[in-house]
Image: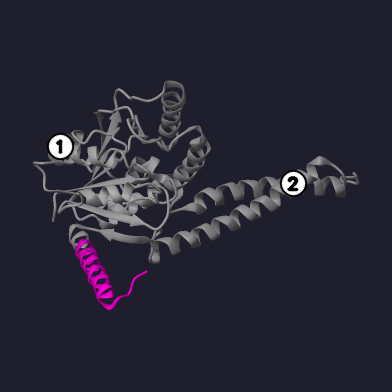
């Protein structure tokens, strides 16, 4: 088994591929490693650029369409073979020279996850840094997983932790939370961060609401993933109890001869009563869903168009050369027979 697999997800990063590969080869020359590039539906020449540099240590997993970074990471982890797994971006903002340091710390100090913290972040202050700091503070307070920089992709894992992350949707921002749910020991170290030289950032303010929506999901999974009835049942019984109390009070008033029709309190009592019943029902359904999730086999969330390795690249080149030779022979044969266009 290789010591390290570096999983890099890319989408429309054609100008970054060659300098990134050179940086990886230089930084990891003393490690037995492989690099898994996952192309997440690029529409430029990113795939072509990766095929140009494929060798014994580089593999390209080409997805059929754009599934999102989380799903692309899952595909890369699935196709990796290393004892340890590193995640990194393909935009050259993460520095590959930090990976050996992080791997050494993980191995010598027996951590499960070593996460990067962008110490001197080279991004815009108002559009990137300030929203990121606010989001990090909210995530820390709600999940109780105290990581300073949730947005840094650069991380190194033990393989068993990476394989069980359960990444889908856009949950890559919450990888430390997902790891913590497995009981992983996590430490954060300062890493380098560079300004983007080529290509266009995929992030913007528009992701804020998606992050907040995913945060609610993370809080639920962290606290109630194996016991959803504790959340919905508690709220349901409180609502049901209040609804019963209000309706009993109104029943007493009715028996005493008062007119209760049209009172706002009767509407509140009915809402609480029905809402309580619904919440309890949702809790039961959620419990059944969770049992199905944990007991049934989980289908993959992506489809691969093709996997490119050095051997496949050679086969493709050989087929292309044979096809060219056949075309030439066919052309010569046509000329000898007197056939022309």
Query: Is label 1 in a helix, a strand or a loop?
Result: helix
> Image check: 208 left or right of 153?
right
State the separation of the CA atoms marked 1 and 2.
67 Å
Q: Is residue 174 magenta?
A: no
Q: Which mark is residue 311?
A: none
Q: Position of residue 325 (x, y in %)?
A: 21, 68
Q: Residues within 10 Å of mark 1 (few under 14, many from 20)?
A: some
What residue do we see at 25% from left, 29% from top?
191
Q: Residue furthest front?
A: 338
Q: Position of residue 180 (x, y in %)?
A: 33, 43
> Image check: 166 left or right of 309?
right
Prevalent SS, magenta region? helix
What residue do we see at 84% from left, 42% from top?
263
Quarter containing the N terminus: bottom left
Q: Which mark is residue 27?
A: 1
Measured along the vertical axis of the image, is residue 328 above or below residue 252? below
Measured along the vertical axis of the image, is residue 26 above or below residue 62? above
Q: Mark 1, mark 2: which one is toward the viewer? A: 1
Residues 29 and 52: in front is 52
Q: Position of residue 65 (x, y in %)?
A: 42, 55
Q: Are marks 1 and 2 in contact (CB under 8 Å)?
A: no
Query: Is label 2 in a helix, a strand or a loop?
Result: helix
């Amino acid at each position: 088994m290789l010591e390290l697999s570096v999983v890099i997800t890319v989408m429309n990063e054609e100008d970054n591929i060659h300098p990134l590969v050179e940086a990886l080869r230089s930084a990891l020359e003393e490690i037995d490693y492989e690099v898994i590039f996952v192309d997440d539906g690029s529409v430029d020449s990113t795939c072509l650029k990766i095929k140009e540099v494929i060798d014994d240590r580089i593999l390209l997993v080409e997805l059929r369409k754009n599934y999102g970074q989380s799903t692309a990471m899952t595909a890369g982890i699935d196709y990796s073979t290393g004892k340890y797994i590193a995640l990194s971006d393909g935009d050259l903002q993460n520095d590959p020279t930090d990976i050996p340091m992080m791997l050494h710390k993980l191995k010598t100090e027996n951590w499960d996850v070593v996460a990067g913290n962008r110490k001197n972040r080279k991004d815009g202050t108002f559009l990137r840094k300030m929203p990121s700091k606010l989001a990090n503070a909210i995530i820390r307070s709600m999940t109780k997983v105290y990581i300073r920089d949730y947005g840094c992709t650069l991380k190194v894992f033990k393989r068993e932790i990476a394989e069980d992350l359960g990444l889908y949707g856009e949950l890559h921002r919450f990888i430390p939370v997902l790891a913590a749910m497995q009981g992983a020991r996590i430490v954060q170290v300062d890493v380098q961060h560079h300004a983007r030289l080529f290509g266009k950032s995929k992030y913007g303010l528009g992701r804020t609401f998606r992050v907040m929506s995913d945060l609610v999901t993370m809080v639920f999974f962290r606290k109630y993933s194996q016991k959803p009835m504790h959340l919905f049942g508690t709220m349901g019984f409180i609502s049901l109890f209040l609804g019963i109390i209000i309706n009993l009070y109104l029943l007493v008033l009715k028996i005493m001869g008062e007119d209760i029709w049209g009172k706002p309190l009767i509407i509140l009592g009915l809402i609480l009563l029905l809402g309580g019943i619904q919440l309890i029902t949702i809790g039961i359904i959620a419990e059944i869903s969770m049992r199905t999730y944990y007991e049934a086999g989980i289908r993959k969330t992506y489809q691969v168009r093709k996997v490119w390795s050095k051997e496949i690249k050679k086969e493709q080149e050989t087929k292309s050369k044979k096809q060219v030779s056949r075309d030439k022979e066919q052309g010569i044969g046509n000329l000898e027979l007197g056939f022309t266009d």
